[in-house]
């Protein structure tokens, strides 16, 4: 899976203000600043804000985060059945032997993020 515009999904934990970008300044209103409502590309907080949002979404589905590697999430749906999710920035690999849970997990992610299923 590939999630589009990942750094625009994160919610900021602190107030951040920035100058208006070039081309967005209304005539006669130079010198104003913008208070950011969400993270944007280029902020040092954006990767952490995105990962926090993503972690919250997959854990609400029922996956647990690995203590050994925080980019790995998993669930054991029944004896002998499991699903693993690995995330690297905006790229996600889902694997396991429970096709129904994998399908439900994909639908859950599609409902929260604009996602492209590469179905590899």
Image (cartoon, grey):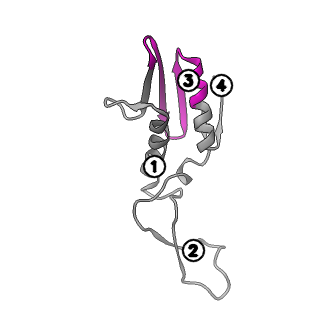
From mark 4 to mark 3, how far is it between C-alphas? Answer: 15 Å
Of residues 81 and 28, the one nearer the viewer is 81
Q: Residue at x 45, y 43 (%)?
A: 56
Give the residue number, with chain letter if any, for mark 2: 20
Front in this rendered view, residue 13 or 107:
107
Q: How far is mark 4 from mark 1, CA to CA?
A: 25 Å
What's the residue at 42%, 12% (across, down)?
A: 79
Q: Which mark is residue 7?
A: none
Q: Position of residue 49 (x, y in %)?
A: 45, 52
Distance between the alpha carbons at the discs numbered 3 and 2: 45 Å
Q: Where residue 24 sits in the image (x, y, percent)?
A: 65, 74
Above or below, 64 relative to 45: above
Q: Which residues are magenta?
A: 77-105
At numbered mark 3, what does the secondary structure look like: helix, strand or loop? helix
The quadrant of the image that shows the N terminus is: top right
Task: Name the residue carrying label 3.
Answer: 101
């Amino acid at each position: 899976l590939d999630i589009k515009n990942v750094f625009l999904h994160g919610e900021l934990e602190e107030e951040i203000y920035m100058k208006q970008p070039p081309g967005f300044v209304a005539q006669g209103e130079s010198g104003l600043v913008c208070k950011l409502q969400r993270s944007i590309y280029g902020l040092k907080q954006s990767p952490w804000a995105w990962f926090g949002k993503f972690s919250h979404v997959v854990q609400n589905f029922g996956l647990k985060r690995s203590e050994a590697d925080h980019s790995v999430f998993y669930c054991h749906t029944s004896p002998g059945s499991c699903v693993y999710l690995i995330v690297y920035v905006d790229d996600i690999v889902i694997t396991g032997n429970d096709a129904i849970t994998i399908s439900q997990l994909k639908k859950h992610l599609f409902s929260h993020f604009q996602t492209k299923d590469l179905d590899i």
